[in-house]
Amino acid sequence: MAAGLRPGLRSGLRPGLRPGLHPPVEPYEHGMLDVGDGNRVYWETCGNPAGKPALVLHGGPGSGAGPFWRRLFDPAAYRIVLFDQRGCGRSTPDAADPRTSLAANTTHHLIADIELLRRHLGIDNWLVLGGSWGVTLALAYAERHPEHVSELVLFSVTNTTRREVEWVTRDMGRIFPEEWARFQDAVPEAERDGSLVDAYARMLADPDPAVRERAAREWCRWEDVHVSTHPGHKPDPRYEDPRFRFRFARLVTHYWRHAAFLDDGALLRDAPRLTGIPGVLIHGRMDISGPPDIAWRLARVWPDAELVLIGGEGHGLSGDETTDAVLAATERFSGTERGSGTEQFSGAERGSRAERGSGTERGSGV
């Protein structure tokens, strides 16, 4: 049936080859932007310098903006801007170093970084594309600065609310009981009935490297499990890298335990601020750890949003159908639409679903 992403928590697209992707491109410009608080953010621009500006917000938090993201845009039509959010990828300091403070790493800092980068590049407004955690960040940015957002393309929709975090870290144990028991049992016994994200954050800050490594390994093992709800799921190879998994686990737990540093429910509450901004919400029906009702509820309060639900695919760009829907959206907004064959709904039809036959599953991951 079709594709989706994984919950507003973690991700940066996993590299892969799909027939519908645009050809690989290299940056024509890149740099390190001093954003304050001792942080320098890596950024790059690809495609057409005179094209329509588009900003990519990667997932995770902590995944980094890999080259795969560039291929979701027509390089002849778009000026594609990517950056690694604070603490990850090529940005410094690296959260993989346990000595790196995360005190100045919050959603509000990231929104300020986006605005600083926009002004640095001389861009007035841009299309914003985000997946998984990148959706949470995109919504927070667009609701704060709607005058600088021309369109939104969002897949594997998340809001990173406390309820969503509890769902992923505890309730998904009803779907994967054996694997969740291992995830729970990795924390000290006295903490197993409390907040597991808090328990893991404490372990990841432990002075003992062995405790930190075990916490990172078990956190990422669970990350791989709870998104494996669609046929053909393959483990994420990034978790084999000890620096990546520690950085990733540390940043995810940091943001999750604070519910993205937002008032709970704020993104849904403030969605009317998006009125007038065209948007496409793309979500896999088999994205169980990031349930489709998150996207559905958002579509009901955002008048200009189209909801695309794709049956048979899970979290992330796990199959051709989700990828096709993202490509169709970026092409439509560039004026080079080529049609994905997936139904889209808006206005009175928001909340309906579009389902079609499944393509080859290529694995999840954002």
Image (cartoon, grey):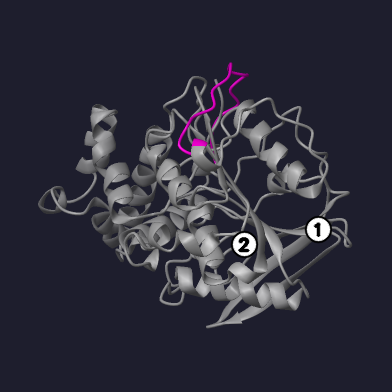
Q: Which residue is mark 1?
A: 52
Asked which secondary structure carries label 1, the reply is: strand
What amino acid type is highlighted by mark number 1? Lys
Q: Identify the image quadrant of the N terminus.
A: top right
Which residues are the magenta region?
349-365
What is the x, y in percent for residue 28?
Answer: 86, 60
Q: Identify the image quadrant of the C terminus.
A: top right
Q: Residue at x 45, y 77 (%)?
A: 104
Q: Residue 98 occupies which quadrant of the picture?
A: bottom left
Total labels: the figure holds 2
Q: Of label 2 and label 1, which has the lower sequence position?
A: 1
Q: Residue at x 51, y 59 (%)?
A: 139
Q: Residue 7 occupies which quadrant of the picture?
A: top left
What is the x, y in percent for residue 205?
Answer: 32, 64
Camera sees residue 7: no
Q: Which mark is residue 84?
A: 2
What amino acid type is highlighted by mark number 2? Asp
Query: Which residue occupies the foreground of this view, 240 or 7?
Result: 7
Camera sees residue 32: yes
Q: Main secondary structure of the magenta part?
A: loop
Q: Residues within 10 Å of mark 2 (few under 14, many from 20)?
A: many
Q: Residues within 10 Å of mark 1 (few under 14, many from 20)?
A: many
The reply, left or right, for residue 10 in relation to residue 124 is left
Residue ranking furthest to the left: 190
Asked which secondary structure carries label 2, the reply is: loop
